Amino acid sequence: MSESFTIAIDGPAAAGKGTISKAVAAHYGFGHLDTGLLYRAVGARMLEGVAPIEAAQNLTPDDLARDDLRGPEVAQAASKVAVVAEVRAALVDFQRAFARRVGGAVLDGRDIGTVICPYAQVKLFVTASAEVRARRRFLELTAAGKVISLEEVLADVKARDDRDMNRAEAPLKPAEDAVLIDTSDLSIEDALAAALAVIEERRSAS
Ligand code: DC
């Protein structure tokens, strides 16, 4: 295996890519970067009145460690700042440096296989129907005490999909050589097994 091994995992919100990415990274002892967190941190700063480009150019470890980045308001704000080319540009170097870390890296997001790491040894595109994803997110949010309806969550998911897929800059789409995993009817274990099967095949070939 070469010194750095990069696994790119892209897909829409709540498709299971975060869960799969964490488990894959733990399985191989690789580093894991949830790139959505970078956009969420910029989105949170925007909600506080900071201009998104300025926020992206001055992001600190403290911004990423905030405990209020997981909510639906910040998610929508993240999706909005993610449309801005200068915001995306400000976050590229950090992501690429992480991807090259010695020992291997898993990055999950929207444009990892297409823009950030087109050379990645493994590219997965993890998806599921909007209804299944909304239900999962709804259960997560209500378990965390948030009062929200399933319809609101579905509308949020669809609005974010629409914005993420139709923006001009680095839109959400599978890389040509990505392997698609549809988790709509898969358990977490089965989805992880499907991901590991693809990765194992690539690792033995590299
Ligand atoms: O993965 P997430 O739900 O935490 O991402 C929040 C938003 O950030 C998502 O709606 C779009 C944006 N994003 C992006 O444009 N590119 C990435 N690589 C990751 C996230």
Image: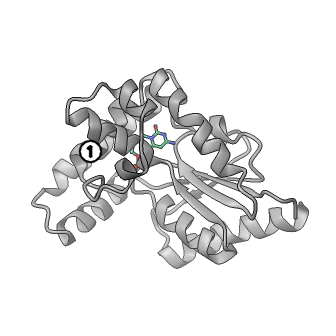
Q: Name the residue type under label 1.
A: Val
Q: What element does badge 1 sit on?
A: helix
Classify 46 as above or below 95.
above
Which quarter of the rendering shows the C terminus? Answer: bottom right
Quadrant of the rendered structure where residue 39 is? top left
Give x and y (percent) for residue 92. Answer: 58, 35
| Other-residue count near label 1 (Cα within 10 Å), few / some / many at <14 / 14–19 / ≥20 | many
Q: Quadrant of residue 97?
A: top right
Which image quarter is the N terminus in? bottom right
Q: Position of residue 155 (x, y in %)?
A: 23, 43
CB at disc 1 and ligand 1 closer than 8 Å:
no
Q: Is residue 30 left or right of residue 18?
A: right
Question: Mark 1 — residue?
Answer: 74
Point out the residue furthest to the left here: 147
Above or below for 137 versus 116: below
Q: Is residue 115 left or right of residue 57?
A: right
Query: What residue is shown at x 35% (from left), y 59% (from top)?
Result: 132
